[in-house]
Amino acid sequence: MSEMDQDSQNSGTHIKATREDWLNAALDTLISDGVEQVKVLTLSTKLEVSRSSFYWYFKSREDLLDALLTVWRAQNTRAIVEKSQSPADTITQAVIDLGECWFDKTLFDPRLDFAIREWARRSGRVRRILDREDDARIGAMRDMFLRYGFEATDALVRARVMYFTQIGYYALELDESDQERVALMEPYLQAFTGLEPSAADRRRIKDLLRVRTD
C-alpha cells in the first residue's frame, strides 16, 4: 500500500477538498501565519481531509506556492493594470477610477500583498517576482499619465508618488475611516495630477465609498 493510500485509509474521512479549497486554505495561512506555515499537513488538518488529496491537484508544496503567486498576480497586479487602462475623459477621472482598487478588496487585497512582501524578505526568487510586479503596476500608472499628455519623467514620478503613497498607507496600517479617506481624496487628487477636481470628480469620489459599503 502506498504512503498516500495509507494516509487516506488512516484519516478516517472521505470528505473531498477541491483545488480551490486547498488554494483558499493556503492563502489564508499565508496571510495569517506566513509562508513557512503553508504546509501540506497543516492545510490538510485545517481542511479536515487526508494529505493524499492534495496530490490530485498539486505536484508538490512548491507547485502550491507557485499557484499562490499566480493568484496574487492575477488579482492584485491585474486590478491595478486594468483600472489604469480603463477609458476616462480626464486624468482626474482616471485616477479616481484607479482608486477603486484601494477601496474594494475584491480588486486589490492589501493583506495578500504584504504577505507576499514578507515572503520576499526570505526568498530571492520571490523578491525578483515582486520587483517585476511592482514595476508592472507603476508602469501601467505611468502610461495612464502619458495618455493624458504628461511628459515622460513627470508621468513616472507621479505614478511612483501615487503607488508609494498607497503602499505606505498599508505598511503603516493607518487607522483611518473610509469617510476620512474620501474627505482627503480631493487634495490627494490635486497633488497627484496638479489639477483642480471638477464637480463630476467630487461626485465620483463620493461614489467610491459605496464600493466598500454596498
Image: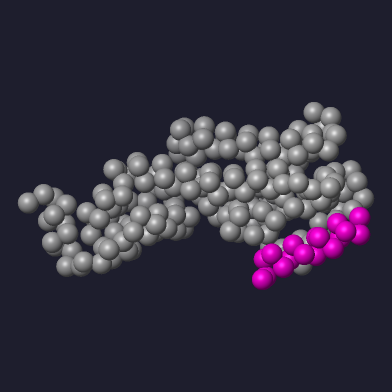
Residue 126 picture location, percent across and down: 48, 37
Q: Which of 8 and 184 is in front in this view?
A: 8
Residue 176 sits above or below residue 134 on the image: below
Please tell me which residue lies in front, 24 or 191: 24
Q: Measuring 16% from the left and 52% from the top, which residue is drawn there?
A: 4
Query: Residue at left 60%, top 59%?
Result: 105
| Image point (16%, 57%), residue name | 7
Which range is magenta? 198-214
Q: Is residue 112 left or right of residue 15?
A: right
Residue 137, located in which quarter of the rendered image?
top right
Visible in this render: residue 154? yes
User: What is the chief secondary structure element of the magenta stretch?
Assistant: helix
Q: Is residue 111 left or right of residue 70?
A: right
**Residue, far left:** 1
Residue 125: in magenta span: no
Among all residues in the image, which is located at the extreme top? 152
Residue 99 in the figure: left or right of residue 46: right
- The residue shown at (35%, 41%) is 62
- Toward which corner of the image does residue 84 lie, by quadrant? top right
Residue 212 lies left or right of residue 94; in this view the side is: left
x and y percentages locating residue 104 in the rendered image: 64, 60
Q: Where is residue 60 in the image (x, y as percent from the top left)?
A: 29, 43
| Residue 211 among those drawn in magenta | yes
In percent of width and height, residue 67 lies at 41, 45
